[in-house]
Structure formats: C-alpha cells, structure tokens
Image (cartoon, rainbow, N blue to C red):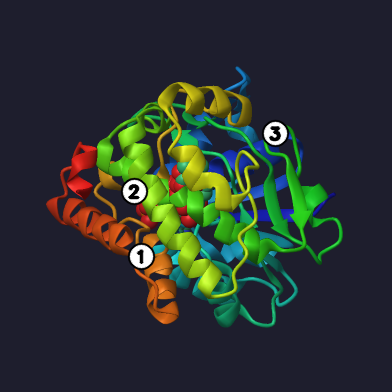
Amino acid sequence: MDAHIVVAGAGGIGCYVGGCLALAGRKVTFLARPRIGQALRENGLRISDLDGHDRLLAPDAVDASADPAVLAGADVVLVTVKSGATEEMGKLVAAHARPDAIVVSLQNGVDNADRIRSLTAPRPVLAGMVPFNVVQSSEGERPLRMHRASEGTVLVGAGVPGLAELLSVEGCVSAAHADIEDVLWGKLLFNLNNALVALSDLPLAAELADRRWRLVLARQMDEALTAMKASGIRPVAAAGGAPPALLPSILRLPDWLFALLVRRMLAIDGKARSSMWDDLQRGRPTEVDALQGAVLRLAKRAGTAAPTIERTIALVRAAERAGSGAPRLAPDAFD
Ligand SMILES: NC(=O)C1=CN([C@@H]2O[C@H](COP(=O)(O)OP(=O)(O)OC[C@H]3O[C@@H](n4cnc5c(N)ncnc54)[C@H](OP(=O)(O)O)[C@@H]3O)[C@@H](O)[C@H]2O)C=CC1
Ligand SMILES: CC(C)(CO)C(=O)C(=O)O
C-alpha cells in the first residue's frame, strides 16, 4: 500500500478522490493548475459528504504541483481531467510517467481510456467509473472544499491485483469490475441528465423531482438504449442499481411514486448538480460531445434515430456560445 498515486488534473473529482486517499495515508501528489495547487498548499483541502463527514487535509499534508514532471514518480496515475483535455494529459503521461505506471481514467464518457491508451502504450490503462457528484467550493472559499453530494462505489477495470484495494478508502469506496466497458455505457445513460441539469440550472434532486424533465431524460435514454441494443452493447446498471432497460419507465412514473423509489435507490443531497453545470457556469467547454455525442455517433452507425439527443446537443452548444452560464431553460425547450 505504499504505491505513489498521482492525480492528473486536480479539479472536483481529482481533489475529492485524491483527498480521500491522502487522508487515508496513501502517498498522493496532485498535478494541478497553479491556482488550485497554490490553494491546496496554502490552506489544505476540505473533504465533506452527504452523510455529514467533514475532514481537513492539512496544508503540510498536501503535495501539489503544476509541473507534469511529478508524473515520473507515479506507480498509479489517476486521470481526472475533462474529456476535452484527455489528449493533452495523455501526452503528458507519455512524456513523463514510467513505462510500467498504471493509468486509470476516472472520467465520464466511454472512450477516454482508449484515447489515453493510444497515446501512452505500453502502460496499462484501465477505465474507471465515478458514480457520485462532487460539488466544488464557491470561488474564493478557502480551504478549497470538495463535497460528495451523492453515493456509490467507484468501479475500476479488473486485471491489476490490489489496485481496487489501493483506491478503496473512507469516503471513496472502490471495487474492480470485469465488464468495465459495459459499466461506462450504463453510466452514460445517467450522464445524459448532466445536460438537463446544466440547461435547467436546477439542483439534481429538484430537476429529477419534476416529471417534465424526467420525460426529456427518458426520451434521451430510449434513444440511447435503442442505439446500444442495435450495436450489441449491454449497459450495466450504474447508480441506484435499476436495470438500464427499465430506467425510462421508472422516469415516466408519477412524481409521488418516483420520489418514493428514488429515496430508496439513490441518496442525493440538495447541493448536487452535474459536472456539465459546473462547466457552463465557469464558461468552460462542456463534455456534451463525449456524452450525447457518443450516443449520436453510435445511433448514426446503427441507423437508429436520436432526435432528443440531437436537440440536447444543439441547446448545450448554444449555451456554450452564449457564455452566460446555465440558461435556465424550461422542459418545453425540447418540444
Ligand atoms: N464533477 C463531478 O461530480 C463528476 C465528474 N465526473 C467526471 O470526472 C472527470 C473530471 O471532472 P471534474 O473533476 O468535474 O472536472 P474539473 O474541470 O473540475 O477538473 C479537472 C481539472 O484538471 C485541470 N487540468 C486540465 N489539464 C491539466 C493539466 N495539463 N495540468 C494540470 N491540471 C489540468 C483542470 O484545469 P482547467 O479547468 O484550468 O483546464 C481542472 O482543474 C470528467 O470526465 C467528469 O465528467 C464523473 C463523476 C462526477
Ligand atoms: C454524478 C453525475 C451522474 C451527476 O451528478 C455525474 O457523473 C456528473 O456530474 O458528471
């Protein structure tokens, strides 16, 4: 358990996962932008969650740098950049990390691990899946705070003995999964909602409580499930554990019944939104191409229809171009 873990891209997920690992005594280095690295070094990192835990990784316990040369010390590299930065980070890993370093993509989307692998061979590259939402502290808040606002077990591809154990600590439970590709497709179904949270500007729990938004999500999921089925992809249940094929019907339930089911299946606190909401609010490019875009490409190849997915992409692109944050659309923007 003395492996050196480098978090490659310390933002919401990188700081939360890396923070939990460091608090558990793992040797962690954060490869971070100068602004984040400086805040971590000066004030430490606050790690909290929906169960009320709130811990501080003290400044002198943080190892953070903006220099990619820190990748040279890694036994394990956790790639936690947005999908648009995968290529840049893959090249840095290839340039600096040892040839035997194990690389794990903890990103959403279905092809980030493949993209990293193509740049970093011969290093073993595994895909991973983070099921929970991390809410980052507001601008200027010190210490930086990363709050886990929903639940779930991080899953990583099987094949490296001891890796899941290394990554499984208090606040961030991890396990190996033999069919990680199917897990990623299962997670993608949930990530189709990232755009709806971002476009509505609603917290995740409030957005899911509104059947009109759930109907839009159900339409996207129907289109994605049809394309997956036609392509021979069998998505594995992600958050909440409901079989993927049932998700659209569950979403179409009346509000009261849905609320009852969700309370049993999913714990989400009022702060949770989506990583795409973070991007729109910060004027950053979103991951819509890695999420809805992946479904659209699959649908085109399979010859299936995906009009709601296409509409979602157009609305997110328009919001990116407008650059004024989450546009507060109503569900009828999809009519
Ligand atoms: N946030 C969440 O709740 C969840 C996110 N995910 C997934 O996890 C992945 C990461 O998301 P998230 O943590 O939200 O993203 P963030 O944008 O918060 O974090 C990524 C960080 O990496 C930094 N970065 C990019 N390139 C470099 C570089 N070359 N050197 C150092 N730092 C770099 C970014 O800086 P800069 O922005 O300046 O480029 C940013 O600070 C995504 O694929 C997302 O979909 C999965 C589950 C939940
Ligand atoms: C946890 C979830 C599904 C949405 O909150 C997510 O993956 C994200 O925010 O990117």
Residue for point 31% across, 31% down: 202
| Left or right: 245 in relation to 305 | right
- Secondary structure of residue under mark 2: helix
- Front-most of 8 and 301? 301
Q: Is residue 121 visible?
A: yes
Q: What residue type is labelled 1?
A: Asp
Q: Does the residue labelled 1 lie within 8 Å of ligand 1?
A: no
List the residue tagged with mark 1.
289
Q: Which amino acid does label 3 sit on?
A: Leu
Q: Earlier in the sequence, mark 1 or mark 2?
A: 2
Residue for point 47% across, 69% down: 227
- Front-most of 287 and 137? 287
- Secondary structure of residue under mark 3: helix
Residue 98 in the image: x percent, y percent? 69, 73
Residue for point 20% across, 37% down: 330
Q: Which of marks 1 and 3 is nearer the N terminus?
A: 3
List the residue tagged with mark 2.
195
Disc 1 + disc 2, Cβ < 8 Å: no
Residue 189 in the image: x percent, y percent? 49, 53
Label 3 neighbour load within 10 Å: few <14, some 14-19, many 20+: many
List the residue tagged with mark 3.
23
